[in-house]
Amino acid sequence: MNFKVEKRVGVRATSERLWDVIADFPGWNAWNPVETDVSGTLAFGGSIALSEAIPGLPPRQYAARIGDWQPNGRLVWTERRGFLFNVLRYYEIEQLEPGSCILSNGFIFSGFRGEGFYEKHRKTLRAVCETISEALRVTAES
């Protein structure tokens, strides 16, 4: 079973502008207060490394694999956190009309331990998704 936490926001920017911000891994430190020091290769199966600072949890560094990406559309990476604990992390852009998009970002937890983590931290994770969405919106609109 999968457990999802997501935040969707409207953004007054083109999908190209949003994608430029998302695809600029070294630039994440300027707008993303949760996922920083991002480096890696934007390619199917590419490796990505980053630091994560979720309030109330210890900061951590981890490596993941890019599972899917589409220019101006989505970035998805997966992380195996251990036995029975997997996380899929994503950013999706849906262009409604030129200069107007819906941005989604979220986590999908799977596995028995993933379910426990979700149950314990879902309120914090919702706030994290909201913080990231708002920061990305402000950056893309400026």
Image: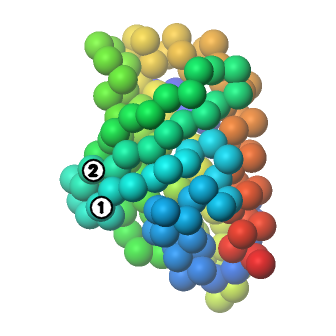
Determine the secondary structure under disc 2: strand
Side (left or right) of 105 relative to 61: right
Query: How many numbered marks are there?
Result: 2
Side (left or right) of 76 relative to 6: left
**Which residue is more in the foreground, 34 or 82?**
34
Q: Classify 2 as above or below 113.
A: below
Q: Could one spot residue 61 in this view of the protein? A: yes
Residue receiving disc 2: 47
Determine the secondary structure under disc 1: loop
**Residue positioned 77% across, 67% down in the render:** 138
| Residue 20 drawn at (x, y percent) | 52, 76
Amino acid type for the residue under numbered disc 1: Thr
Q: Residue furthest bottom?
A: 98
| Residue 113 drawn at (x, y percent) | 43, 12
Q: Quadrant of residue 74?
A: bottom left
**Spatial CA span between label 1 and label 2:** 6 Å
- Determine crowd level at label 1: few under 14, some 14-19, many 20+ residues with C-alpha closer than 10 A: some
- Where's the N terminus, which quadrant? top left
| Residue 38 drawn at (x, y percent) | 46, 52
Amino acid type for the residue under numbered disc 2: Ser
Decide which of tag 1 and tag 2 comes sooner along the chain.
1
- Determine crowd level at label 2: few under 14, some 14-19, many 20+ residues with C-alpha closer than 10 A: some
Q: Quadrant of residue 86?
A: top left
**Residue positioned 74% across, 45% down in the render:** 130
**Which residue is more in the foreground, 127 or 100?**
127
| Residue 67 drawn at (x, y percent) | 30, 50
**Residue positioned 57% across, 28% down in the render:** 59
Q: Could one spot residue 15 in this view of the protein? A: no
Q: Are the two marked residues, 1 and 2, in contact with CB atoms closer than 8 angstroms?
A: yes
**Residue positioned 48% across, 69% down in the render:** 24
- Where's the C terminus, which quadrant? bottom right
Residue receiving disc 1: 41
